[in-house]
Amino acid sequence: MKIAVIGCGWLGFPLARELAKNSSTILGSLRVENRFSELKNANIEPFIYDSVNNSELPQIVKQADWVIICFPPKGAKDYADQIKALINQLDAGVKIIFTSSTGVYPNIVSTLNEEAEIIPDHIVYLAEEAIRNSGNPYIILRLAGLIGPNRHPVRFLSGREIENGEHPVNLVQLTDIIEAVKTIISANKTNVTYNICAPEHPSKKAYYTQMAYEMALAPPVYFAKTDSNGKVVDGSKITKELNFNYKVSIYSVYKD
C-alpha cells in the first residue's frame, strides 16, 4: 500500500511516522528540504510540495492508494483553490482523507453531529466541497481543537481573559486522531464525513483552570459572559460505524 501525507507538520509528521510502522510505502511532503533526514529516519519517503505555489506532485503520489491532506489554511484566501490544485493531480481512484475542522459549525446552542448546520462560506468547508465534488473517494475528518506534544490551548490562555467560561470545550488528542485515520484506512471506508472530538465536554472555566494547575501555569483570570450557551460537537458517529474508541482523555498531559 502507498500512502502519501501532504503536510508533515505537527499533525502530519507523527501520523506518517505511525503509518510507516505498518504500511509498505509512506510518502511525506515538506515545503523545503531541511527536514528530509528526519523523515527518512522515520521510514518516510520525503518529497517537496508547496501548496501556495501549487507545485507538481511526484508521479508515485498521484497514483497512491491514499492521500491524506494535513496542511491548514493559515489565513489563505484561496485555500479551496489550493486543495483543488492538489486533488486535480491525483488519479481518479486515489482515496483522499481531508483533515477539516469543527470550526465549520456555527457557535449555536446545540449538540452538533455531521448533519448539523454549517457555515456555508467557511474557508475550510469550501475546501471540503472541492473534495466532495472531485469524483475521488474521500473521507472528511472534522477535527475538534487539537491537543498533543507542544500543543495545548491553555498555554495560550494562561493569564488571559476568556469569554463565555460556561461554554463547553470541544477537543481531541493527537493520539486519537492518528488512531482514527488508521481505523478508516483499515476499514477502507470512503465517501463519509466524521467529527473527531473527544466525548468529554467540561466548561471552559472548569477545564482550563484545572489544566493550568496541572501544567503549573497561571489560570485564565477572568471569564466574561459566563452564560450556559455553546455548542457540543458529537464525535460518536465513527465509534458507532467503525468500532473506534477515543482512548486518551483531554485531561491527559503530554510530556513536551
Image (cartoon, rainbow, N blue to C red):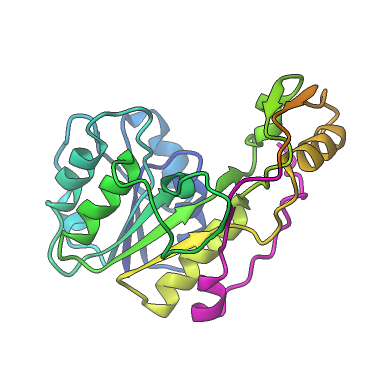
Q: Which residue occupies the foreground of this view, 60 or 94?
A: 94
| Residue drawn at point x = 81 percent, y = 41 percent | 206
Instruction: Give the quadrant of residue 36.
Output: top left
Query: Which residue shows up at 50% across the image and 39% down it?
Result: 10
Residue 41 can be seen in this image: no
Looking at the picture, tell me which residue is in the foreground, 94 or 143: 143
The answer to whether any part of residue 111 appears in the image is yes
Horizontal and vertical percent position of residue 126? 26, 46
Coordinates of residue 79 in the picture (x, y in percent): 26, 37
Range of residues picked out in magenta: 228-256
Give percent across and percent down for residue 14.
52, 49
- 239 falls in the magenta region: yes
Q: Residue at the spot x=81%, y=32% of the render?
A: 212
Is 26 covered by the magenta stretch?
no
Residue 183 horizontal side relative to residue 252, left or right: left
Report the residue at 52% width, 65% height from top. Answer: 180
Q: Quadrant of the C terminus?
A: top right
Quarter occupied by the N terminus: bottom left
What is the count of numbered marks?
Answer: 0
> Residue 159 at what x, y percent from top left?
76, 19
Magenta stretch, main secondary structure, is loop
Is residue 232 toward the left or the right of residue 12 in the image?
right
Q: Is residue 158 left or right of residue 192?
A: right
